[in-house]
Image (spheres, rainbow, N blue to C red):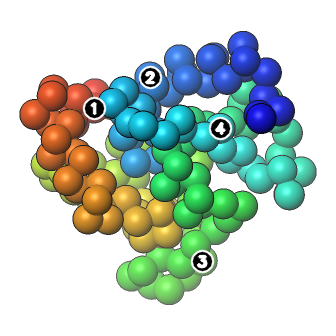
Amino acid sequence: MSDIPFVLREEVILRAGNRCEYCRLSQIGQEATFHMDHVMPRADGGPTIFDNLALSCVSCSLRKWAHQMAPDPDSGEEVPLFNPRRQVWTEHFRWDEELVVALTPTGRATAAALALNRPVILVIRQEEATRGRHPPGES
């Protein structure tokens, strides 16, 4: 059972447009309920408040876990993971059909750490495209 109040959870889902805020997968049509990710993990003192929560698919949530940093695959340098509360998705990523293309060190580290182009998600995105749900509109 979640310790996040229903109203708060609904507000986070609405803000996210019912999509994972990391890989942008629509929750519509998915069997698993998406998680409420603490962008700053509770283990590091992150509060359970609107400004610290992000909607996350199960795969991204489990891969992100309590991490806030990951290595940039190009430089090897530890960089911050994408923060959907402070950063704009389109500044760090773009779409090439089903592929997420990372544009920055943070984008590359996040794409690698969360496996944003894992084979299963590519197949899901192809199916989503046939249903008109991919690519998502970005702001």
CB atoms at circles 1 and 3 under 8 Å apart?
A: no
How packed mark 3 is, by other alpha carbons closer than 10 Å (few <14, some 14-19, many 20 or more), is some
| Residue at image coords 49%, 55% | 59
Cβ atoms under marks 3 and 2 closer than 8 Å: no
Q: Name the residue under label 2.
A: 17
The residue that appears at 37% across and 59% down in the rendered structure is: 116
Query: Can residue 88 be seen here?
Result: no
Quadrant of the frame with the C terminus: top left
Between marks 2 and 4 in the image, the one whose residue lies nearer the viewer:
4
Q: Which one is earlier in the sequence, the residue at label 4 or at label 1?
A: 4
Of circles 3 and 4, the one toward us is 4
Q: Residues within 10 Å of mark 2 (few under 14, many from 20)?
A: some
Residue 11 in the image, given as x and y percentages of width and height: 63, 17
User: Which residue lies under the disc numbered 3?
Assistant: 78
Instruction: Please state which of residues 113 and 59 is positioned toward the viewer in this rendering.
Output: 59
Q: Position of residue 71 (x, y in %)?
A: 54, 78
The mark that comes first in sequence, 2 or 1, is 2
| Marks 3 and 4, how far apart at CA | 25 Å
The residue where tag 4 is placed is: 36
